[in-house]
Image (tube, rainbow, N blue to C red):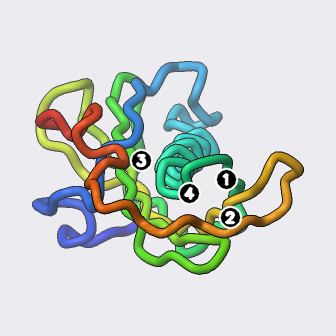
Amino acid sequence: MESTDAETQGLEPRGDLALRMVAMPADTNPSGDIFGGWIMSLMDLAAGTAASVRAKGRTATAAVSHLSFLLPVHVGDVVCVYTEVIRVGRTSMSLAVEAWALPRGHGDRHKVTAAEFVMVAVDANGKPRPVPPASSDAGGLRGRGGAGGI
């Protein structure tokens, strides 16, 4: 789990804040660190939320790639997940998703996990449907619970 300072320090998160959670003891692995699957589930929830806003409806996770666990997360850390839509196709979109940790809710934040999620817009029957054109407003998640200094 080696990472460079450029990967984890001194950078701003990419995209908009989509989710924020406190890591709890129930979320640990046998070594006492926060379980990577818990972090990945937060990232999936955040990607799904952002994709559903962009798709104006239901979406499903199709793929996750370039998943990198950069640093451990500890009990009490505030995990903030940021998303940015980076590509939109006919029925799917790709999002850059980053998880950042704020140690025990104070101090300097650092990037702990990064991945690319592919989300597919689906209809009520779970079948792919076209992603509508982007609206001219900057709606999305921006302005509704944005970074707020985290």
Relative placement, left or right, of 9 versus 96 is left
Q: Secondary structure at mark 1?
A: strand
Residue at the image position 59 percent from the left and 39 percent from the top: 38
Marks 2 and 4, how far apart at CA: 9 Å
- Residue 1 seen in the current view: no
Amino acid residing under circle 4 = Ala
Above or below 127: residue 88:
below
Disc 3/disc 1 C-alpha distance (Å)? 29 Å
Mark 2 or 3, closer to the camera: 2
Q: Residue at image x 19%, y 44%?
A: 109
Q: Which residue is mark 3?
A: 72
Q: Are the two marked residues, 2 and 1, in contact with CB atoms closer than 8 angstroms?
A: yes
Q: CA distance from mark 4 to mark 3?
A: 33 Å
Contact (Cβ within 8 Å) of mark 3 with mark 1: no
Tell me the quarter of the image containing the N terminus: bottom left
Chain-order first, disc 2 or disc 4: 4
Q: Is residue 118 above or below residue 77?
A: below
Element carrying mark 2: strand
Label 4, residues with CA under 10 Å away: few <14, some 14-19, many ≥20: many
Amino acid type at image mark 3: Pro
Write down the residue under mark 2.
120
Q: Which residue is mark 1?
A: 59
Mark closer to the chain start, 2 or 3: 3
The residue carrying pointer 3 sits among few (fewer than 14), some (14 to 19) or many (20 or more) residues within 10 Å by Cα, namely: some
* Residue pictured at 89% horizontal, 50% vertical: 125
